[in-house]
Image (cartoon, grey):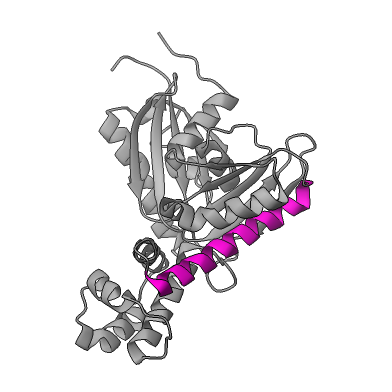
């Protein structure tokens, strides 16, 4: 490949980390995923190893030398890795830093945000930002012990607890949730109690694994399972309440602004987004709901190039 300037974008949080390599024209050359980096839940060394694996994986796959990376941008929930971690690998790079909020807006192609960014992933956080006066607000993001209502983790945890009630006959609603968890964890119905207790306390289940159960529950909900629909509806209502609370701090009902939602829970479609859509239509009829779909690191890279374009070398 002919000599050029490249941009390396690194993004990550409590579910995974991701590195994207872009050329000066904004073409995505490679995206590489690695494990989570939020040091509230993993060690600093584990986080550092994760981002190094993601960055090296992207460079190796694209057959680009680290010396040719001109700009290195990152947006990580928790640590901040820069020249002390990547200086030898990318010795010519200028390091710049962004936030999780920036990435959510960028995933919907919004690089000058005016609105609310809602993270609907393992955790749940809402960010508000006005482009005209610079006011900002943040709500949620307290983690699984203190908050994260409406998150995939909260949904998955409630599914586990609901399955226990179903198994013991203490749940009034009919549900296939025990069967679904048996299939997911490869447990037999006869061994459900012992197996689930072992997974919960001895293994133990990670935040990402519990959050991953959200896909199981939303699938059941889409199939009409009454209990799964109740659990999903509660998560959807909690997310909508979080976003609306952020909006109320910065915007009036008559204003036009964007509400961008990004994260794995958006894969459930209207089961998760319907409540937010309805609440926005009622309280903020001029607000526009958008879904952030671009890969997080790739979106971060495009944002960085929008802010400071790279010149191609001959």
Is residue 249 or residue 275 the one in the foreground? Answer: 275
x and y percentages locating residue 284 in the rendered image: 71, 47
Q: Within the image, what quadrant is residue 145 found in? A: bottom right
User: Is 5 rendered above or below residue 187?
Assistant: above
Q: Is residue 78 visible?
A: no
Magenta region includes residue 289: no
Q: Within the image, what quadrant is residue 208 found in? A: bottom left
| Left or right: 152 as drawn, with respect to 176 | right
| Residue occupying image coordinates x 69% and y 39% | 257
Is residue 27 or residue 274 the one in the foreground? Answer: 274
| Left or right: 17 as drawn, with respect to 131 | left
Magenta region includes residue 244: yes
x and y percentages locating residue 33 in the rendered image: 34, 46
Q: Which residues are magenta?
A: 225-252
How many numbered marks have been drawn onto this rendered protein structure? 0
| Left or right: 225 as drawn, with respect to 302 | left
x and y percentages locating residue 249 in the rendered image: 77, 53
Is residue 264 or residue 19 the one in the foreground? Answer: 264
Q: Magenta part mainly helix, strand or loop?
A: helix
In which quadrant is the C terminus drawn? Answer: top left
Q: Is residue 194 visible?
A: yes
In which quadrant is the N terminus drawn? Answer: top left
| Left or right: 122 as drawn, with respect to 169 | right
| Residue occupying image coordinates x 69% and y 38% | 114
| Residue occupying image coordinates x 59% and y 64% | 238
């Amino acid at each position: 490949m002919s000599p050029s300037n490249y941009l390396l974008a690194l993004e990550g949080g409590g579910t995974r980390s991701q590195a994207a390599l872009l050329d000066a024209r904004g073409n995505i050359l490679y995206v590489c995923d690695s494990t989570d980096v939020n040091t509230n839940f993993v060690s600093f060394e584990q986080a550092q190893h994760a981002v190094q694996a993601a960055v090296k994986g992207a460079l190796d796959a694209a057959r680009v030398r680290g010396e040719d990376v001109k700009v290195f941008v990152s947006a990580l929930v928790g640590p901040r890795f820069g020249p002390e971690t990547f200086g030898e690998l990318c010795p010519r790079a200028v390091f710049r830093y962004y936030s999780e909020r920036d990435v959510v807006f960028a995933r919907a192609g919004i690089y000058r945000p005016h609105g609310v960014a809602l993270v609907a992933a393992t955790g749940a956080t809402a960010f508000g930002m006005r482009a005209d006066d610079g006011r900002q607000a943040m709500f949620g993001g307290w983690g699984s012990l203190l908050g994260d209502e409406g998150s995939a983790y909260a949904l998955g945890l409630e599914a586990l607890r609901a399955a226990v009630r179903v198994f013991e006959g203490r749940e009034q609603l009919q549900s296939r949730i025990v069967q679904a968890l048996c299939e997911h964890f490869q447990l037999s119905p006869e061994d459900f109690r012992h197996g689930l207790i072992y997974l919960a306390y001895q293994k133990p289940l990670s935040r990402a694994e519990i959050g991953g159960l959200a896909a199981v529950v939303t699938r059941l909900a889409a199939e009409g399972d009454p209990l799964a629909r109740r659990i999903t509806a509660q998560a959807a209502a909690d997310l909508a309440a979080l976003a609306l609370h952020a909006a109320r701090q910065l915007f009036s009902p008559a204003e036009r602004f964007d509400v961008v939602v990004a994260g794995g829970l958006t894969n459930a479609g209207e089961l998760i987004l319907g409540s937010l859509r309805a609440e926005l239509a009622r309280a903020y009829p001029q607000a526009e709901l958008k879904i952030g779909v671009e890969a997080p690191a790739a979106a971060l890279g495009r944002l960085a190039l929008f802010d400071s374009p790279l010149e191609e070398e001959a």
